[in-house]
Image (cartoon, grey):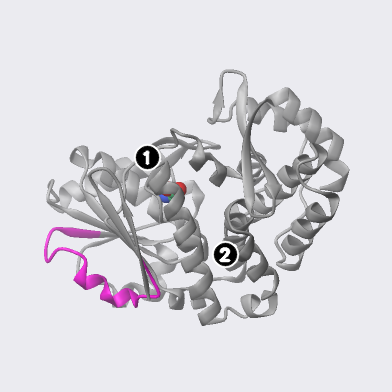
Amino acid sequence: MKKVIISLDNHKSEVYVGLNWNEVRNFIPASGCVIITDDNVYKIYGKLFPDFPVISIKPGEDSKNIGTIVTLAEKLLDEGIDRTGFILGIGGGVVCDITGFLASIYMRGINFGFISTTLLSQVDASVGGKNAVNIGKIKNILGCFRQPRFVICDPDLLLTLPDDEYLSGLGELVKMGLILDYNLFEKIENNIALLMSKDADLLESLISDSVELKASVVREDEKEISGKRMILNFGHTFGHVIETVASMKHGFAVAAGMVIASGISEKLGLIGLEEFQRIKSLLEKLNLLKKYSLDDNYFQEMLLKDKKKQGSLISFVLLQSPGRAVVRKMTVYEIMNLYRSIKKQV
Ligand code: GLY
């Protein structure tokens, strides 16, 4: 078991990797707690939840909207939850976002924690304190920063994940290696068979690596002010558009976005052709590259609406090498021209 502490100005978040999730009883208050989960998680694990009121939402990205937040807030009021209350989110990225956002605004903010049940949320989404919901197809447009008190990442929970949900998590894991740690990238490359068989020891070690990396970024730039945190958006500028239009799970869309961003990095002379091919080949071997077809004009229109755009510039994340990312401010037109020039290779 590994404990990673994210200490920030006046708060602290603790992430436990490899801890049995039943230990959560040692982390939550004896009363005044409500559990938020989704129907899939509840069906499998609900009987084993701590004995507190449970609110279960419909699984999937469509639940991540302000209407859900209002409905859940009304339920918290019905349960008599006050400012001393606690919300425990048990689920993947969507449950974590909803729990974190709700807890951040309910009575101007109450404490919360997560049991993270998907690979995607264990390696990325449950850690870091960004909480948001979507407006229509525009992702994470209403949000805030507030850290969970604790996050439990128990790899045993991953054994019941549907295959595509598991693979989707691998997309974010590869991202962590590509932007921050060549050794992690190589460890994934060298262990594809074990990874595909969900080897428990390997998973625990990869999740630990990823949480450590994410924690180091969040400690340095919790609120995306210095720009360091922006590198976590690698593959996401195009990925978010692909995700909404091609209806793919997040990690698959990020994989497609990472191929585009790596292709653009190659075109700009930052990485070599061999490195680009190596990255694409790893994503292919992990079954992460799905076919999609998208109209260039639509891409452009959506990039113009990107929430990371400042004036006419997008902070676009590129690779300097596998394991090292760099952020460059570019106009949507520059990005689109580069995209058009590499479209056939990606
Ligand atoms: N909750 C996701 C993040 O902070 O990046």
Q: Which residue is mark 2?
A: 165
190 over 269 or under it: above or below: below
Residue 11 lies in the magenta stretch: no
Q: Could you tell me which residue is drawn at 31 percent across and 49 percent down?
A: 147
269 is higher (above) or lower (below) than 282: above
The label number, if any, that marks residue 67 in the structure image: 1
Can you say whether 126 is above or below 201 in the image? above
Position in image of residue 294 (x %, y %): 76, 39
Image side of residue 272 versus residue 223, left or right: right
Q: Is mark 1 within 8 Å of ligand 1?
A: no
Disc 1 crowd, CA 10 A, few/some/many (<14, 14-19, 20+): few
Tag 2–tag 1 contact (CB < 8 Å): no
The amino acid marked with disc number 1 is Gly
Give the percent coordinates (x, y) of residue 339: 79, 35
Tag 2 secondary structure: helix
Q: Quadrant of the N terminus?
A: bottom left
Residue stretch rendered in magenta on the structure: 16-34
Residue 28 lies within the magenta run: yes
Residue positioned 57% across, 18% down in the render: 311
Direction from residue 21 to residue 160 in the image, left or right:
right
